[in-house]
Image: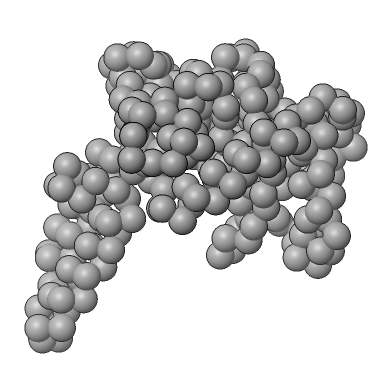
């Protein structure tokens, strides 16, 4: 199934079309059993398309424009499977800005959350620095991904929640956050200073404590190790342990 649909966008569209097609036959055609089978097939296919941990890389495609060919070369195949053509073109524009300025940052609203996209050159602790910057603004990171191509260009995306609606109620903060991330990436601002002034959140109650666990999986990939960490959520959690792994080549995906 994954080999036929090839991308996450297509498996989503096919699942919705199948659900609508069965449901249109008659009101009772979409039974709970059929719905469950369809959902399990979707999950299995989605996991197959997104589980790859940087083993397979996008080869150089001669039919693409030189700029796009250079940008895509060496990125994990999972990047092509999980991004639409429009998203890839937007990332290519950011790559052009990065070549001019040393860093390119985009910030957009995505349904009930926000997404920050960063294109820049690789360096140690880059991922942790951006995560710390978002934490200093009081943002709650929901999901993050890190990609790098054969030229050492990195593409990081952070999906985060804004619990106090700071960006929505104060549009000028959108530009301030974007500029601050760029300055941190270029080394003009120390993220540790930003974290000292981050908003203080109420600690979780004792009854809601989640036991911390760490597990390692060396079988998930021939070239990478999967580290799974389960812990109580709190501001700056990512920034505490990410510096232990300064090589971003080991960082593939966080949820």
**Image coords of residue 144 (percent x, y):** 55, 39
Residue 254, given in percent of the width and then of the height, sits at 50, 34
Between 204 and 151, the one nearer to me in the picture: 151
* 72 and 144: which is toward the camera: 72
Q: Residue at x 66, y 16 (%)?
A: 124
On the picture, is 227 further left or further right than 10? Answer: right
At x 78%, y 55%, the residue is 174
Task: Identify the image quadrant of residue 200.
Answer: top right
Farthest-out residue, bottom: 26
Callout count: 0
Quarter of the figure with residue 152: top right
The answer to which quarter of the image holds residue 217 is top left
Q: Is residue 91 above or below residue 78?
A: below
Residue pictured at 51% horizontal, 27% vertical: 148
- Image side of residue 228 versus residue 137, left or right: left
**Measured from the top left, where is residue 221 in percent x and y?**
31, 19
Residue shown at the point (82%, 24%) measured from the top left: 187
**Above or below for 87 versus 64:** below
Report the colour scheme: one colour
Q: Nearer the viewer, residue 204 or 231?
A: 231
Residue 10: x %, y % from top left? 27, 56
Rendered view: 27 above or below 89 = below
From this viewpoint, is residue 186 visible? yes
Instruction: Residue 133: tell me if it is visible.
Output: no
């Amino acid at each position: 199934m994954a080999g036929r649909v090839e991308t996450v966008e297509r498996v989503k569209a096919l699942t919705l079309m199948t659900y609508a097609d069965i449901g249109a036959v008659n009101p009772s055609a979409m039974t709970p059993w059929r719905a469950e089978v369809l959902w399990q097939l979707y999950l299995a296919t989605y996991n197959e398309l997104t589980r790859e941990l940087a083993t397979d890389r996008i080869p150089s495609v001669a039919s693409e424009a030189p700029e796009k060919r250079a940008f895509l070369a060496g990125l994990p195949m999972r990047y092509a499977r999980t991004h639409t053509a429009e998203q890839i073109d937007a990332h290519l524009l950011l790559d052009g800005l990065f070549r001019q300025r040393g860093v390119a940052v985009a910030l957009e609203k995505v349904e009930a959350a926000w997404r920050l996209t960063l294109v820049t050159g690789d360096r140690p602790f880059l991922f942790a620095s951006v995560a710390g910057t978002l934490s200093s603004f009081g943002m709650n990171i929901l999901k993050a991904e890190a990609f790098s191509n054969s030229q050492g260009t990195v593409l990081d995306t952070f999906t985060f929640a804004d619990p106090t609606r700071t960006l929505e109620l104060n549009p000028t903060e959108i530009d301030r956050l974007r500029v601050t991330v760029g300055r941190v990436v270029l080394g003009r601002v120390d993220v540790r200073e930003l974290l000292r002034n981050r908003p203080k959140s109420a600690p979780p109650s004792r009854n809601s404590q989640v036991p911390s666990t760490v597990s390692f999986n060396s079988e998930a990939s021939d070239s990478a190790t999967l580290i799974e960490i389960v812990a109580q959520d709190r501001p700056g959690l990512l920034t505490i342990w990410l510096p232990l792994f300064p090589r971003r080549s080991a960082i593939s995906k966080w949820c």
